[in-house]
Amino acid sequence: MPPSTTAAPSRRDRTRPSGVPSPWQMFFQGFLKHPVMVGSIIPSSDRLIRKMLGPVDWANCKLFVEYGPGVGTFCRPILDRMAPDATLIAIDTNPDFIRYLRHTITDTRFAAVHGSAADVGQIIADHGHAHADYILSGLPFSTLPPGVGPAIATATSAALRPGGAFLVYQFSPKVKDFLDPHWSNIDHDMEWWNVPPAQLYWAWQG
């Protein structure tokens, strides 16, 4: 289904306040401070974003969740495509990124949460939802601390509605080891026009 061409009237980006770094500065600083959590020194390309979000059924998406939003590279395209009554929850363990998102994105449909993706079920419930329609992750599963990747995969599977999907972009195919125990229907593609080239997965909830 093509993206909606009508942006919600509540959507706007704030002018960056004095003293708040640029997105590239924030991303680079975040990588230096937490390289195993950020995973890349360069934000995702526009081509990767379009391909990753392409299969989403926006007309039937009321709650979209993103893990590791960073400086909001995906947040803005998601908000552009979402319905006026939908919600985007962005979860990040880095308080600097959460503070940055709250400074630079204002939208009644958007919530930036400082927390762990492993707690997605509770975070969703705290925002008044029973489940998510889609969950997106760019977290580097293969370099996360032991046990964290499996915990996130388990929590994600429990949080998704039937027919929803876990959208994952990675630079290592090892992420499929985390997906296989929970999803049997997994689509895969590559986006070469990205630095570095990315593995794309869509794990469909049965």
Image (tube, rainbow, N blue to C red):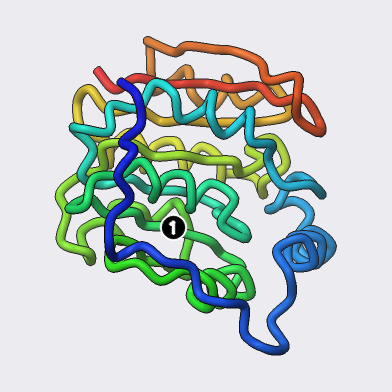
The N terminus - image quarter:
top left
Which quarter of the picture shows residue 159?
Answer: top left
Residue 183, position as x, y percentages in the image: 38, 18
Nearer to us in this view, 25 or 123 = 25
Residue 26 position (above or below residue 191)? below
Against 157, residue 77 (above or below) is below
> Visible in this render: residue 122?
no
Q: Secondary structure at mark 1?
A: strand
- Three-letter residue code for mark 1: Ala
The answer to whether 12 appears left or right of 32 in the picture is left
Residue at the disc numbered 1 = 90
Q: Quadrant of the C terminus?
A: top left
Question: Is 17 in front, or is 39?
Answer: 17
Residue located 42% across and 45% down the image: 78
Residue at image coords 56%, 64%: 93
Q: Say few, some or many: other residues with alpha carbon within 10 Å of mark 1 (under 14 / 14 to 19 / 20 or more).
A: many
> Where is residue 155 drawn, in percent x and y?
36, 43
Residue 174 to residue 187: above or below: below
In the orientation shown, which residue stands out farthest toward the bottom?
A: 18
Q: Position of residue 50 (x, y in %)?
A: 53, 29
Determine whether, in the image, residue 186 is placed left or right of residue 43: left
Q: Judge whether residue 52 can be spotted in this image.
A: yes
Question: Considering only vertical position in the picture, is 148 above or below 183?
Answer: below
